[in-house]
Image (cartoon, helix red, strand yellow):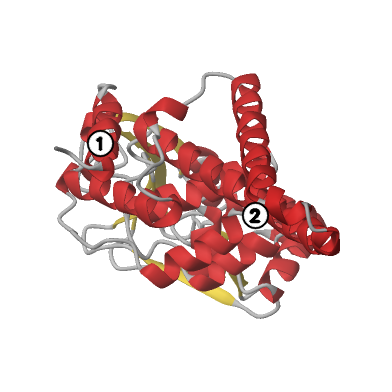
């Protein structure tokens, strides 16, 4: 006869496979998700039964859980309540247990939402831009990492924080090691102002780099960068970082981001440098939780600051997918071209 864990595993696998997209998840990713659920909230938790279609359903369910837990507490302490001298102790115990109930409800909500994210967005649980089908890493999530995650996620009572921690767990399930202890601490301590700074700067990231121009060196973006440099997310704001771009012997250079790339044509072998801020590992991890940058707009901005000396044309290419090994170009747009008679 199957035990509770077997039933949960069968139920969760069935739920994950019920959607055509979720079938793209590898067995290893599913195993990590099931293992995380088991270690975070116990194998008796029935994920499929608690996937809700509306916010009101979730709120009603959570309140029902609280009420049932409180009634069980009162039944447990009835004999103690009969002793007048124990009433103060019972009051303290009930208060402590109520606090634990809220933490457990928060944690279960985060895990449930993470499972839902993975079910509906396999890419989010893959830890990369490619499908997780080819995931060959059988590694389970680190126990110490799960302990740190639990201590933070159980404090997430708002929808926003629950969604954030759900994305963290989904990313770690897809690729163990995606979020370091430093990233967990930052996410746990981030305030509204820091979050807004992260959102503004994350939109400018191109492959772990923020290419800058004179507009970046004043105003809000510069202040954002200084603040996040102090937090360890950005590098080189108060100093100078330059990214080299060298054209090949055929006079070609490429800066790619996602489905787009700048295709630079010019004199063979020329080398130029672009001013930039670096994004640290922690910054990359934190920014991965935010909406993706506008790759097309960012590359067009880079094209404006590329030194045009010895160049003939800069094109914006659009690829069929974000897979860097896929060479299929589906669109090409000239964003700068040397004019006839131009000596630059």
Tell me the tag on residue 7. 1
**The image quarter in which residue 187 lies:** bottom right
Image position, residue 83 (x, y; %): 79, 58
Estimate the x, y position of residue 119 in percent, counting from the top left. 35, 32
- Viewport quadrant of the N terminus: top left
Helix, strand, or loop for circle 1? helix
Q: Label 2 belongs to which residue?
A: 100
Q: Quadrant of residue 258?
A: top left
Q: Which mark is residue 298?
A: none
Measured as percent of width and height from the top left, residue 151 is found at 58, 63
Secondary structure state at the residue bearing disc 2: helix
Mark nearer the N terminus (2 vs 1): 1
Residue at image point 74% right, 70% down: 226
19 up-or-down from 280: above or below: above
Whole-angstrom CA distance, mark 2 to mark 1, is 26 Å
Taking 1 as reference, is 291 left or right?
right
Residue at screen point 38% across, 28% down: 48
Q: Residue at x 28, y 31 (%)?
A: 11
**Front-most of 3 and 27?**
3
Number of numbered discs present? 2
Judging depth in this view, the residue of 185 and 214 nearest the camera is 185
């Amino acid at each position: 006869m199957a035990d509770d864990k077997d039933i949960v595993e069968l139920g969760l696998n069935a739920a994950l496979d019920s959607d055509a997209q979720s079938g793209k998840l590898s067995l290893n990713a599913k195993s990590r998700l099931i293992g995380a659920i088991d270690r975070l909230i116990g194998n008796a938790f029935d994920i499929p039964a608690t996937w809700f279609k509306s916010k009101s359903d979730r709120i009603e369910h959570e309140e029902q859980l609280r009420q049932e837990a409180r009634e069980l507490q009162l039944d447990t302490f009835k004999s103690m309540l009969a002793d007048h001298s124990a009433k103060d102790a019972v009051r303290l115990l009930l208060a402590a247990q109520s606090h634990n109930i809220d933490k457990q409800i928060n944690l279960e909500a985060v895990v449930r939402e993470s499972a839902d994210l993975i079910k509906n967005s396999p890419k989010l649980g893959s830890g990369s831009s490619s499908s997780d089908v080819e995931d060959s890493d059988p590694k389970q999530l680190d126990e110490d990492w799960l302990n740190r995650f639990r201590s933070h996620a159980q404090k997430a009572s708002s929808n926003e924080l629950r969604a954030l921690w759900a994305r963290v767990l989904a990313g770690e399930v897809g690729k163990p090691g995606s979020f370091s202890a430093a990233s967990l601490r930052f996410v746990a301590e981030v305030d509204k102002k820091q979050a807004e700074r992260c959102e503004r700067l994350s939109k400018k990231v191109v492959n772990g780099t923020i290419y800058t121009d004179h507009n970046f060196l004043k105003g809000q973006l510069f202040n954002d960068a200084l603040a996040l440099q102090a937090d360890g997310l950005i590098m080189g704001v108060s100093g100078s970082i330059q990214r080299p771009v060298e054209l090949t012997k055929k006079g070609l250079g490429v800066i790619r981001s996602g489905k787009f790339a700048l295709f630079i044509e010019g004199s063979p072998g020329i080398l130029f440098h672009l001013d930039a801020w670096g994004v640290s590992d922690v910054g990359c991890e934190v920014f991965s939780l935010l909406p993706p940058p506008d790759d097309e707009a960012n590359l067009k901005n880079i094209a404006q600051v590329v030194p045009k000396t010895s160049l003939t044309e800069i094109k914006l290419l659009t690829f069929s997918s974000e897979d860097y090994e896929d060479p299929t170009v589906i669109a090409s747009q000239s964003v700068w071209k040397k004019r006839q008679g131009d000596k630059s």
